[in-house]
């Protein structure tokens, strides 16, 4: 399966494991996770939780929770039936089978809108079982020595023998995950990890940043996944935590744009946005929704940022120092979203979408379609000073939903409002990718495409056609996340720091402080290289 981003995983007592991907696929491994296969029968989209249990006759029950309800399979995922009878709200966030499921057939489900449900017949019917819980999302359920616990957006609750839920600590905190570790209970919250003894007395640990996932082994080793800085490990039951990120692939990179006057705009996937006009002091920017892409006018004049959420285009208001929606918005299909953004020197905006469309508008120009030649999502658009347009398309291969191709196309001149759409030509491609992600940079007559650990460089002739395409591969385990150019120099962000790429294809790491650190965004100015790590740290490296 490679570096496919997974949402949740479930194991059976043998060597079988199930996982769902962010793209909505369900995959199975029959050898403890060494090899994975896609289950074509699954067609219900992204999954929030998986649960696996065996009944008294040895029959395996696989449950999957989605935003549209719960589904059950009795044949290892080959077929599925809806299991929603009795659910008042279909949006389920967590599932947990009782330890005695073989006899009791009890399974619990927590809802996004405050509901908690119990089934006593293996999911065939559900009843509300959340008496005493607040009107807050139930995000995790765990069987512990202290009893059945539920982690909610308002703290931890324990089920009494009278089937009533009572608060038992961390009031007012958003609890994302619970795990029992060597006689100790751990809770992952938006304020870090907390430990509790059998009396449910909670104490903070050394890790204080938001935590999304927890897992514990029987020897007291615990792992957690954080929002900002990857995976951490504890060898003492969760008291002290240390980062363990070596070899991990960075994911969901921050967004960064640098305007011609040096002003920077940074945003993360959770909706936090800041800007700086000197790279030292940073100020927050209030926007109602999370951004998916940002860009800036490269001209040395007052900053002109453009940004986009999944459905809207925003423009920088220099007086208010914030991003505001454009007066006119592009028309998108209901199931389409914005995936790429580019800005001309005179303020005209181009957007690319998940369905492969391109729309042009803004700066007094009505929005209209621009035909793109490639298949799949338009994930990057790049405009050159001479008026050329480059488009990066990523599409699933026809014979495999888990293999992807990245193609770079060029339009010699973007003449608005009516460009010659027949002039597109393909420059290069990378095939057999394990993830639908690639990055693109253009500098003069040189085009750089990077994906996974592969790099392709094309040098264009006077007519804009590639004279030569050089392909190189970094060592296995490297995953490129961003590419930046400066003259003849090329720099690549990766899960193992920043890598310098020479014109001959030779490559080496630079900046000893970032060695083995996941770097997820990269850009240059005249004198320095700027890097942003997975945890949101901003680093500057002199290159002149």
Image (cartoon, rainbow, N blue to C red):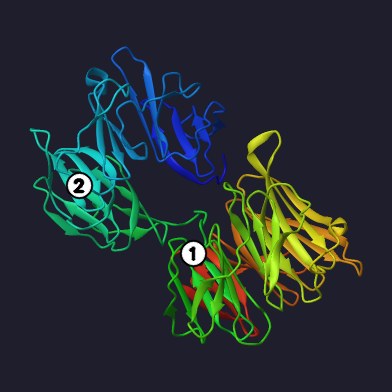
Q: Residue at x 15, y 55 (%)?
A: 202
Image quarter of the C terminus: bottom right
The one nearer the camera, 416 or 374, is 416
- From the image, tell me which residue sits under label 1: 517
> Viewer-proximal residue, 480 or 43?
43
* 349 sits left or right of 519 in the view: right
Toward the viewer: 274 or 523? Answer: 274
Q: Which label lies toward us, 2 or 1?
A: 2
Which corner quadrant of the image does residue 418 belong to? bottom right
- Residue 26 location, x and y as percent? 51, 34
Residue 78 is situated, as x and y percent measured from the top left of the image, at: 51, 21
- Residue 269, image x and y in percent? 47, 61
Is 481 on the left-hand or right-hand side of 191?
A: right
Q: Is residue 322 above or below residue 64?
A: below
Element at label 1: loop
Side (left or right) of 426 relative to 103: right
Q: Residue at x 49, y 21 (%)?
A: 79
Residue topped by disc 2: 185
């Amino acid at each position: 399966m490679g570096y496919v981003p997974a949402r949740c995983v479930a194991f059976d007592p043998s060597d079988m494991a199930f996982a769902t991907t962010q793209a909505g696929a369900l995959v199975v491994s029959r050898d403890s996770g060494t090899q994975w296969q896609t289950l074509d029968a699954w067609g219900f989209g992204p999954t929030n939780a998986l649960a696996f249990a065996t009944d008294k006759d040895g029959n395996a029950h696989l449950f999957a929770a989605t935003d549209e309800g719960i589904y059950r399979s009795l044949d290892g995922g080959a077929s599925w039936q809806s299991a929603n009878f009795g659910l008042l709200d279909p949006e389920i966030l967590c599932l947990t089978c009782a330890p005695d499921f073989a006899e009791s057939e009890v399974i619990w489900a927590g809802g996004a809108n405050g509901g908690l449900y119990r089934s006593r017949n293996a999911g065939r019917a559900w009843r509300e079982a959340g008496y005493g819980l607040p009107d807050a999302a139930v995000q995790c359920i765990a069987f512990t020595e202290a009893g059945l616990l539920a982690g909610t957006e308002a703290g931890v609750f324990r089920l009494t023998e009278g089937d009533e839920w009572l608060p038992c600590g961390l009031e007012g905190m958003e609890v994302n995950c619970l795990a029992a570790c060597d006689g100790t209970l751990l809770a992952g919250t938006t304020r870090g990890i907390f430990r509790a003894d059998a009396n449910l007395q909670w104490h903070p640990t050394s890790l204080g940043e938001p935590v999304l996932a927890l897992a514990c082994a029987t020897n007291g080793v615990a792992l957690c996944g954080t929002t900002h800085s990857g995976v951490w490990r504890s060898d003492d039951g969760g008291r002290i935590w240390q980062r363990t990120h070596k070899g991990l692939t960075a994911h969901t990179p921050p967004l960064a744009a640098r305007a011609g006057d040096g002003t920077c705009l940074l945003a993360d996937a959770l909706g936090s946005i800041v800007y700086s006009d000197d790279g030292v002091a940073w100020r927050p920017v209030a926007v109602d929704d999370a951004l998916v892409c940002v860009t800036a006018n490269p001209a040395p004049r007052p900053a002109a940022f453009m940004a986009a959420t999944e459905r809207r285009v925003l423009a920088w208001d220099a007086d208010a120092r914030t991003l505001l929606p454009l007066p006119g918005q592009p028309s998108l299909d209901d199931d389409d979203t914005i995936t790429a953004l580019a800005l001309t020197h005179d303020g005209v905006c181009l957007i690319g979408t998940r369905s492969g469309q391109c729309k042009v508008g803004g700066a007094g120009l009505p929005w209209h379609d621009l035909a793109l030649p490639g298949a799949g999502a338009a994930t990057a658009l790049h405009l050159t000073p001479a008026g050329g347009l480059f488009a990066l398309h990523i599409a699933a291969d026809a014979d495999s939903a888990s293999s992807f191709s990245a193609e770079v196309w060029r339009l010699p001149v973007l003449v608005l409002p009516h460009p010659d759409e027949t002039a597109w030509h393909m420059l290069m491609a990378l095939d057999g990718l394990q993830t639908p992600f690639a990055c693109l940079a253009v500098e003069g007559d040189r085009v750089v495409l990077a994906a996974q650990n592969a790099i392709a460089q094309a040098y264009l002739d006077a007519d804009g056609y590639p004279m030569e395409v050089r392909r190189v591969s970094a060592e296995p385990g490297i995953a490129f996340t961003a590419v930046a150019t400066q003259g003849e120099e090329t720099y690549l962000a990766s899960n193992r720091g920043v890598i310098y790429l020479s014109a001959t294809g030779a490559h080496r790491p630079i900046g000893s402080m970032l060695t083995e650190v996941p770097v997820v965004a990269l850009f240059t100015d005249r004198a320095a290289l700027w890097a942003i790590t997975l945890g949101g740290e901003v680093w500057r490296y002199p290159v002149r």
